[in-house]
Image: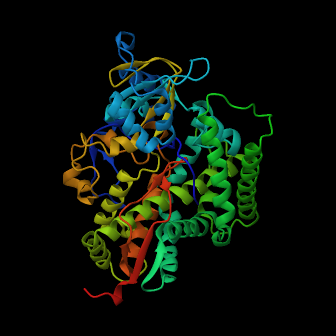
Amino acid sequence: MRYHGAQIAAGCMRIYDPGPLSLRASADGLGLATPDSRPEEATMNIDTARLAGNPDKSDTAGAAMNPDVGALPLAPKNPLPRLQQMMCLRTFHTGAETLRDAGGAVTRLELAPKWLMPPVVIATSPQGGRDILGRSDAFVDKTVIHHEVRHLFGANLFDLTHEPWLPRRRALQPVFTKQHVRAFGGHMAQAAEMVASTWVDGADVDLDAQCRRLTLRALGRSVLGVDLDQSADSIAEPLRVGLGYVADRALRPLRAPRWLPTPARRRARAAAATLRQIAADILHTCREDPTRDAPLVHALIAATDPATGQGLSDEAIRDELIVFMLAGHDTTSTALTYALWALGRHIEMQDKVRAEVAGIGDRELTPADLSRLGYTTQVLHEALRLCPPAAAVGRTAMRDINVDGYRVPAGTTLIFGTYAVHRDPALWEHPLVFDPDRFSPQNSAGRDRWQYLPFGGGPRSCIGDHFAMLEATLALATIIRRIEIRSTEDDFPLAVPFTTVAAGPIPARVYAHTNRSA
């Protein structure tokens, strides 16, 4: 799947506490960022309070982040020429760094009159991330890009505004507990073995294409109950067309009315119709055969909102399956591609991963092995730092709010530059160096939770983060156990059409490990 141009990306959702980051050995071995240990009642933050149906506590917490906002100054106007500011928005992974360097960690863009386009405030500091992403929806909500996604692809957890999102979120959160996720991820090691077994010793491969093939196979077999090997193009091309249209339209100050049948709109609607049909067929097959091995689909069918007892309609399930295909096709595959490419440039790190997985034995890896793959997990965290799925996350200020000491008026578009924060030399020592040890438990102790946000943060962060980490960890360990990767290019080109993806092929030479000398 290839993209042209670069646009703003945005995150999805999962619960996090905005405390200091600590990576500790967990029961599932994912090594995910978790809050420091505190009494349970002390960690009832704005996210959990809101989702538990207690908006007063949530809004009180949000107000505590917003004291005397009227007395604060506006964010400084960015001094770059307006055309350059617009170009930065359209190459937003690196553009946010340019805007920060010129205008500071919180900077304001006024690209058009307010009646035509709202002002934009870019934040590239951990506190700015907390102030934008860590609030309840009384203070911030989704942006125009989310509205465009919803209009084209349907309503899902990614694009819903707060009121319809809350019951959907309550219904789906139990589906993505660690226990359920382990069931979803069972086929990933097998898929990695199958894909790697097709690599000829000494052959040149495109790591990006191979990882997309791998994750799509695992997604189909472990989650959706279908074989997607033959449907890769029918999913990849509609996603490319639809998301490109959405991102282009969202960034235009002037947009053609929806009733106008432009060529781009016709192509986008046809692409969305293709994806809806694929998702609808998957759902129909699973309803016809309740014994079909499709754990995610059956879980969505069974899901109910615990507050109301109401389940999901077929339309709602279909729309969630579409966004899950997007995440499975792009997010996990790109993280895995980057990790393999980096290990192909650092053979000593690759050997360390291989030694770690060798300690488990020669059998097929399972989710139960994750607790023994600590260094492999660190490799993935470092890959996600340098190549975060969402290079930037957007929100809309619903009222005047405080963002890192500046007043942001209601109606302003808020953007948190994840990519820029992950590579900020003021926050990370040698930020462009690939160093998995920076995510060791000792080196992570005391790190600001909002300094590292590969899956977003706050109440709307990614619900599938555990699934993505489980998939990528099993796949990386399985491949490195069998294959030695030698990256043949020193650069990993990135593009951000919607999520962060490789901008071109990622070539590498692969060898069967048993055929290489020590």
Q: Seen in the image, is 109 located left or right of residue 352?
A: right
**Residue at x 80%, y 35% (from the top left corner):** 260
Q: Which of 49 and 250 is in front in this view?
A: 250
Residue lying furthest top = 71
Q: Which residue is drawn at 34% across and 45% down?
A: 422
Q: In which quarter of the image is the C terminus?
A: bottom left
* Quarter holding residue 447: top left
Closest to the observer: 291 or 89? 89
Q: Tell me if I can see residue 52 in this picture.
A: no
Q: Is residue 64 shown above or below 221?
A: above
Residue 155 screen position, x and y as percent: 66, 41
Point out residue 407 in the picture as x, y percentages from the top left corner.
40, 17
Quarter of the image where the N terminus is located: bottom right
Label tally: 0
Query: Can you give x and y, in whole percent of width and height, for residue 42 in the image?
Result: 31, 34
Measured as percent of width and height from the top left, residue 383 is found at: 36, 57
414 to 69, vertically: above or below = below
Q: Is residue 453 visible?
A: yes
Taking 397 as reference, is 223 left or right?
right
Identify the image's colour scheme: rainbow, by chain, secondary structure or one colour.
rainbow
Examine the rendered structure and indicate whether residue 27 appears above or below residue 356: above
Q: Residue drawn at (70%, 43%), measured in percent from left and top? A: 152
Q: In this view, does 356 lie above or below 24?
A: below
Which residue of the protein is positioned furthest toward the left in this rendering? 442
Between residue 480 and residue 170, name the one nearer to us: 480
